[in-house]
């Protein structure tokens, strides 16, 4: 058993027991399933801004590069766990983040001071 698991196991056990009435309910399954739609929808306005705005000023490419890394790892976690909800939600978000970075860079954005 690794150190992080040992550290968090009591926390997870406590809250899993306290919240089991909710975590084992159909409502939780429905709410978790909505994540598939909410995660990509949250970034859609930023993608539209990158495409349509007269300037890409204010779009932080560095932030989106970090989000690409984060969503890549979580997408792979969805594959590992065979959880289509995690895979789909993070995978769609990952595609949006990549599009935001590519479009922003093409339209004159910069990454760590570098431009295309």
Image: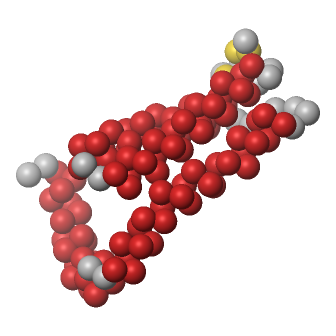
Q: Residue at x 18, y 56 (%)?
A: 5
Above or below for 104 versus 74: above
Q: Tell me what residue is drawn at x 42 percent, y 36 percent.
A: 72
* Quarter of the C terminus within the rendering: top right
Nearer to the camera, 51 or 55: 51
Residue 25 drawn above or below residue 69: below
**Residue placed at 41% from the left, 73% from the top?**
30
Q: Position of residue 74 (x, y in %)?
A: 38, 44
For the question of whether residue 94 can be seen, the reply is yes
Who's the residue at 44% across and 72% down the image? 31
Residue 71 % position (x, y): 45, 41
Q: Is residue 70 left or right of residue 106?
A: left
Q: Quadrant of residue 8?
A: bottom left
In this picture, is 94 found above or below 8?
above
Camera-side residue of 49 and 61:
49
Report x, y in % for residue 54: 91, 33
Residue 41, picture quadrant? bottom right
The relative height of residue 12 versus residue 116 in the rendered view (above or below) is below
- Numbered label tally: 0
Q: Position of residue 94 (x, y in %)?
A: 51, 38
**Residue 110 in sight from this viewpoint:** no
Left or right side of 73 for 110: right
């Amino acid at each position: 058993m690794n150190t992080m698991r040992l550290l968090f196991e009591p926390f997870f056990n406590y809250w899993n027991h306290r919240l089991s009435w909710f975590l084992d309910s159909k409502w939780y399954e429905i709410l978790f399933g909505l994540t598939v739609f909410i995660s990509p929808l949250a970034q859609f306005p930023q993608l539209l801004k990158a495409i349509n705005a007269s300037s890409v000023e204010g779009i932080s490419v560095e932030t989106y590069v970090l989000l690409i890394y984060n969503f890549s790892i979580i997408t792979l976690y969805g594959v590992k766990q065979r959880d289509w909800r995690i895979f789909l939600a993070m995978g769609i978000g990952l595609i949006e983040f990549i599009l935001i970075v590519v479009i922003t860079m093409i339209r004159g954005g910069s990454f760590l001071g570098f431009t295309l």
